[in-house]
Image (spheres, rainbow, N blue to C red):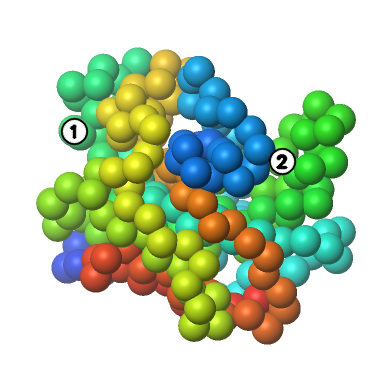
Amino acid sequence: MRYYQWNSKRNEKIQIGKIICLARTYKKHAKEMSVNIPIDPLIFLKPTSSIIFSGGSIIYPPQSHCLNHEVELGIIIGVDGKNISKEHVWEHIEGYCIGLDITARDIQTNAKKNGLPWTIAKGFDTFAPISEMIGKELIKDPHNVNLLLKVNGEIRQHDNTSNMVWTIPELISYISSIMALEKGDLILTGTPSGVNEIKKGDILEATMDSYCSLHVDVI
Ligand code: MG
């Protein structure tokens, strides 16, 4: 079992639930992947066993020869809900984090080509590093935060959540029309452009303005 680490004075232990990931939520990233923005948000799941925290290491799996980083805004659900209307979405959010949706790009490309699911490409252990959690009351506007990722000190991804194709209420309302959202569930909202390769020995540092940060390496 894994529990969120809070940056604030909260001491409530919240167990991490399912991880729902969005894809193609930033136009520039869809363009760099040569794919179109879908009509409805594109979702997939990662196992909870892929979570690691700041200070941890991404383990390069022997089955892949091309790992990519994807920096993303994470949303943590605090109140269970099903068919949540857009107006009520905010009541269901507990907080936010910055996360990485690590992807075995070679395995994913092969899966796409053959019409197979992305579970393997996205689901290896350590493929979901996340920062400490920030209570929602501390974030002025989650639709206007800067996501920054440096690899070995060099900026790889830098964008603002205002450039997301869908709003947070639209995303959560849509997801909850398919699967119930439960306390502790994590939504990774998709990556902006600049995705690139990571190699063994790399140091990754991700920040969401001055709210939270994440430091991991690749082994
Ligand atoms: Mg992603």
Is residue 104 shown above or below 211? Answer: above
Element at badge 1? helix
| Disc sitting over residue 44 in the figure | none
Note whether residue 66 is visible. Answer: yes
Nearer to the camera, 148 or 184: 148
Task: Give the residue at mark 2.
Answer: 119
Callout 2 environment at 10 Å: few (<14), some (14 to 19), or many (20+)? some
Amino acid under label 2?
A: Thr
> Can the viewer see residue 191?
no
Residue at x 31% of width, y 34% of height: 168
Q: How dense is the environment of label 1, judged by Cα within 10 Å: few (below 14), some, or many (20 and up)? A: few
Which residue is nearer to you in this view: 210 or 173? 210
Element on which disc 2 rests: helix
Question: Residue 86 sits in which quadrant?
Answer: top left
Q: Disc 1 designates what residue?
A: 91
- The residue lying at 83 percent from left, 63 percent from top is 65
131 shown above or below 107: below
Look at the picture and state if 165 lies above or below 4. above
Q: Is residue 34 shown left or right of residue 11?
A: right
- The x, y position of residue 104, in whole percent, is 73, 54
* Relative to 173, 156 lies left or right: right
Q: In the image, residue 185 lies at what x, y percent?
A: 42, 41
Q: Amino acid at mark 1?
A: Glu
Which of the two residues, 145 or 118, is positioned nearer the viewer here?
A: 145
Q: Are marks 2 and 1 in contact (CB under 8 Å)?
A: no
Point out residue 90 in the picture as x, y percentages from the top left corner. 20, 34
**Label 2 – label 1 distance at C-alpha:** 30 Å
Instruction: Please name the residue shown 39% across and 33% down the image.
Output: 165
